[in-house]
Image: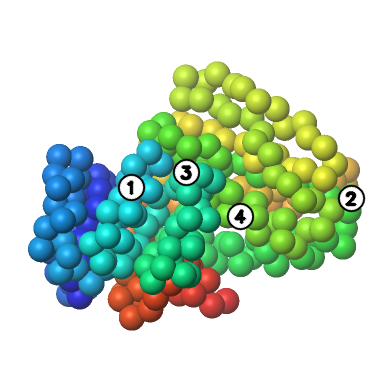
Amino acid sequence: MKIALIGYGKMGKEIEKIAVARGHEIVSVIDIDNQQDFESAAFKSADVAIEFTNPMVAYQNYIKTFAAGVKLVSGSTGWLEEHGEEVKRLCTEGGKTLFWSSNFSLGVAIFSAVNKYLASIMNQFPAYEVSMVETHHVHKLDAPSGTAITLAEGILENLTRKDKWVKGTLIAPDGTVSGTVDCEPNEFPVSSIREGEVPGIHTIRYESEADSITITHDAKGRKGFALGAVLAAEYTATHEGFLGMSDLFQF
């Protein structure tokens, strides 16, 4: 399979290693300095492009990739609120293909399924209050993380006493704390911590006066995310539309 890479930071380089090891060919690498290559023959020859950049440029990368007629896999977050409906419509009605996930880790896919199942059980026990904390490296720009938002939506789908998640506290890289975990009875807080080079930790907690129940996913590095992105690219090469991890892993 021919793969184009959009974004050549630490994730892009890890994806390249895994893709090549699995027998794929990297035909184009686009970063900040060669944006004109979206229009190149090499980029257009790709079966799939894999994009890991940042919230400010992800949407434009999507539009350029679609214009080149290339299918896309992306793990960029922070663009959904403003452009989500438009991008989904381009895939469901406009003939474009995007496989998007806030997190490509197999472990997170399993964790997400456990999260939904636990929420459905806890729906029967209103004495427990739910909350979430996510921790990431200091370079991460969006908070809460896209993965935390996806997990929060999974809770809302299965816990009928809650109909909204809200931003909780944010501990900034310099240690300053802003925000609050106080919220309305129909809401639950998602708090964020930015420290060091943490790849990603997500903890969901149900607490009552009697006890607490906690589940956590703790990423050890980028390798799991990169492998998941390549697996998603292999899937996307033969599928169309707006795709996600629930298509790739059907638990």
Answer whether labels 1 and 4 touch (C-beta < 8 Å).
no
Q: Nearer the viewer, residue 16 or 100?
A: 100
Mark 3–mark 1 Cα distance, whole angstroms, equals 13 Å
Report x, y in % for residue 226.
33, 59
**Residue 127's mark?**
2
Mark 2–mark 1 Cα distance, whole angstroms, equals 45 Å
Mark 4–mark 2 Cα distance, whole angstroms, equals 21 Å
Total marks drawn? 4
Looking at the rendered image, the quarter that the C terminus falls into is bottom right
Q: How crowded is mark 3: few (under 14 residues within 10 Å), some or many (20 or more)?
A: many
Rendered residue at 39%/64% (across/down): 98
Corner quadrant of residue 178? top right
Q: Say which element carries label 2.
A: loop
Amino acid of disc 3: Gly
Amino acid of disc 2: Ala
Asked if residue 175 can be seen in this view, the reply is yes
Amino acid of disc 4: Leu
- Residue lying furthest front in this view? 94
Labels 4, 2: front one: 4
Q: Mark 4 points at which residue?
A: 151
